[in-house]
Amino acid sequence: MSWKKFAAGVGTGVAVTVLAKTTMDQKESVLSPEKALKIVKKKAGEIGRIEGSWVHMMTEPCEHEHLMYDVYRGGVTIAEEDGTVNAYEFYVDASTGAIIELKKQD
């Protein structure tokens, strides 16, 4: 085997490794939908008892106050202290876990 073929093989291996690591790092920076739902349920539990919850498994673009976010969208049903049961819709930033919006449904 010539040294040129060997060098080409090593160069290809390094390039593939760098590309794979970059791709994996980008995917790891996105919260799982389960983790996003857990964050919302913990915060919404301050309003009342959680009766039910759901979250979309895919992120979607969302504009909030002229800024764009990739978010998980979902909802929680809360039994509040006064006995009423209300549905809330939420948007959670998929990269930071910050709750962008939690609004009561009519």
Image: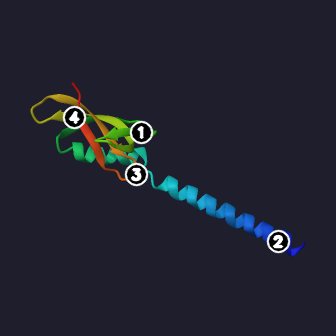
Q: Name the amino acid, label 1.
A: Pro
Q: Percent x, y for residue 32?
A: 43, 48
Q: Callout 3: helix, strand or loop?
A: loop
Closer to the observer: label 3 or label 1? 1
Q: Nearer the viewer, residue 61 or 99?
A: 61
Q: Residue at x 89, y 73 (%)?
A: 2
Amino acid type, callout 3 = Ser
**As drawn, 23 above or below 87:** below
The residue type indicated by label 4 comes to Ile
Q: Is mark 1 on a helix, strand or loop?
A: strand
- Locate residue 70, reporting x and y percent: 41, 44
The residue where tag 2 is placed is 6
| Residue 106, x across and y down, in percent | 21, 24
Task: Give the label, 1 or 4, closer to the camera.
Answer: 1
Residue at mark 4: 78
Which is more N-terminal, label 3 or label 2? 2
Which residue is under mark 1? 61
